[in-house]
Image (cartoon, rainbow, N blue to C red):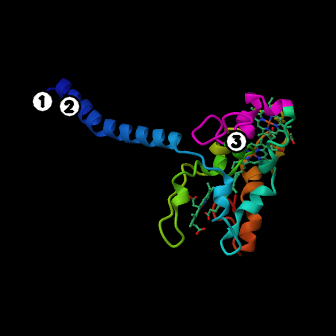
């Protein structure tokens, strides 16, 4: 075999192996984008029991739950502000417009903005199948809103142990939002973020 046909063969083999994989990843991404948001009241019935942790009460006591009330009546009407102060803005099941009954259940920054749309997960069973969320509450999830596009962004809001300043430092911010009080009541530390 000459070297040209060897290269052609290699390219062909590469395409044969890689392209179907790309298609699968593409499909998964599409599915994640189309999953429905269901709203925090749906999470409450399974995640506000003392035995398993009162995650709902914890969320309700924090800033994210009040993120829509914080806006003035004029600002509430403005899609530019709605974008980061509601849940699933413009997405299936998410906030669409002010005064729409279903949309008004999706105000504030609810569970699914950190955990991903819950359409499939809410069919999980205790001691049975737990269907994972569409995404994890990681740095990338936070930075969809915690970025300089926020009109209240302050470059020196966070200062880390080395004196670096930024409007958002994940490892400091997440400790305020990782339900540490709930985990404490369960006698554990937050498994993923407790050691950050
Ligand atoms: C029908 C009950 C039920 C509903 C409704 C429900 N969950 Fe769950 N969820 C579970 C069970 C069971 C587990 C496994 C852990 C446990 O037993 O607490 C779980 C685990 C989780 C976990 C950890 C696993 C993971 O995927 O990261 C998160 C986060 C979570 N739920 C968030 C939510 C959110 C947010 C909602 C609302 C959109 C919700 N749950 C609605 C039953 C439910
Ligand atoms: C890119 C996402 C984003 C957009 C768009 C956005 N906000 Fe916010 N908003 C945030 C975040 C994140 C915070 C938390 C503080 C911070 O980091 O800016 C916040 C906090 C606030 C607060 C509380 C201030 C405080 O620090 O306690 C007010 C009030 C507010 N925003 C008003 C608005 C208004 C009015 C608009 C529309 C003109 C708007 N926001 C658009 C993300 C956004
Ligand atoms: C600001 C983002 C944010 C919001 C909003 C939020 N969570 Fe979480 N949640 C987290 C983070 C971060 C963790 C991971 C804690 C760890 O494991 O260190 C977590 C963990 C959890 C867990 C435990 C997962 C496990 O591994 O056992 C449950 C259950 C959960 N959240 C439910 C909820 C529910 C229900 C709501 C709304 C009522 C909610 N969360 C709102 C960020 C959020
Ligand atoms: C959908 C947009 C959105 C997402 C996603 C989001 N936040 Fe926020 N966050 C806000 C808004 C808006 C506020 C201001 C709420 C208020 O004061 O009324 C806020 C406030 C906060 C605050 C209090 C203000 C500050 O910066 O000290 C912390 C801490 C915080 N968020 C951490 C997180 C973390 C950690 C994540 C990811 C795990 C996250 N947020 C994801 C929009 C968001």
Read off the magenta span.
Answer: 74-101
User: Distance from label 3 to label 2 (Cα)?
Assistant: 59 Å
Q: Earlier in the sequence, mark 3 or mark 2?
A: 2
Look at the image and tell me whether residue 23 can be seen.
Answer: yes
**Looking at the image, is 127 positioned above or below residue 156?**
below
Q: Which residue is mark 2?
A: 9
The image quadrant where one finds ligand 1 is bottom right
Look at the image and tell me whether residue 138 can be seen.
Answer: no
Q: Earlier in the sequence, mark 1 or mark 2?
A: 1
User: Distance from label 1 to label 2 (Cα)?
Assistant: 10 Å
Residue sitting at x 77%, y 50%: 65
Horizontal side of residue 152 vs 170, given as left or right: right
The reply to whether callout 1 and callout 2 are in contact (CB within 8 Å) is yes
Viewer-proximal residue among 132 and 93: 93
Would you say residue 81 sits in the magenta stretch? yes
**Looking at the image, is 22 positioned above or below residue 37?**
above
Of labels 1 and 2, the one closer to you: 2
Residue sitting at x 47%, y 38%: 30
Q: Which residue is mark 1?
A: 1
Residue sitting at x 71%, y 58%: 178
Q: Earlier in the sequence, mark 1 or mark 3?
A: 1
Viewer-proximal residue among 147 and 14: 147
User: Distance from label 1 to label 3 (Cα)?
Assistant: 69 Å
Q: Which residue is mark 3?
A: 101
């Amino acid at each position: 075999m000459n070297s040209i046909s060897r290269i052609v063969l290699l390219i062909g083999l590469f395409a044969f192996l890689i392209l179907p994989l790309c298609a699968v990843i593409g499909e998964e991404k599409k599915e994640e984008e189309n999953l429905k948001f269901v709203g925090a009241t749906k999470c409450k019935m399974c995640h506000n029991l003392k035995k398993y942790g009162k995650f709902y009460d914890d969320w309700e006591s924090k800033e994210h739950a009040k993120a829509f009330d914080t806006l003035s009546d004029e600002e509430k009407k403005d899609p530019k502000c709605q974008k980061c102060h509601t849940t699933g803005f413009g997405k299936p099941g998410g906030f669409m417009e002010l005064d729409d009954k279903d949309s008004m259940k999706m105000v504030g920054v609810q569970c699914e903005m950190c955990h991903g749309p819950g359409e499939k997960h809410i069919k999980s069973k205790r001691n049975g199948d737990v269907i994972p969320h569409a995404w994890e509450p990681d740095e990338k999830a936070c930075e969809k809103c915690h970025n300089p596009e926020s009109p209240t962004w302050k470059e020196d809001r966070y200062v880390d142990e080395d004196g670096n300043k930024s409007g958002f430092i994940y490892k400091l911010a997440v400790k305020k939002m990782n339900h540490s009080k709930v985990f404490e009541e369960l006698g554990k530390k937050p498994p993923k973020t407790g050691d950050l």
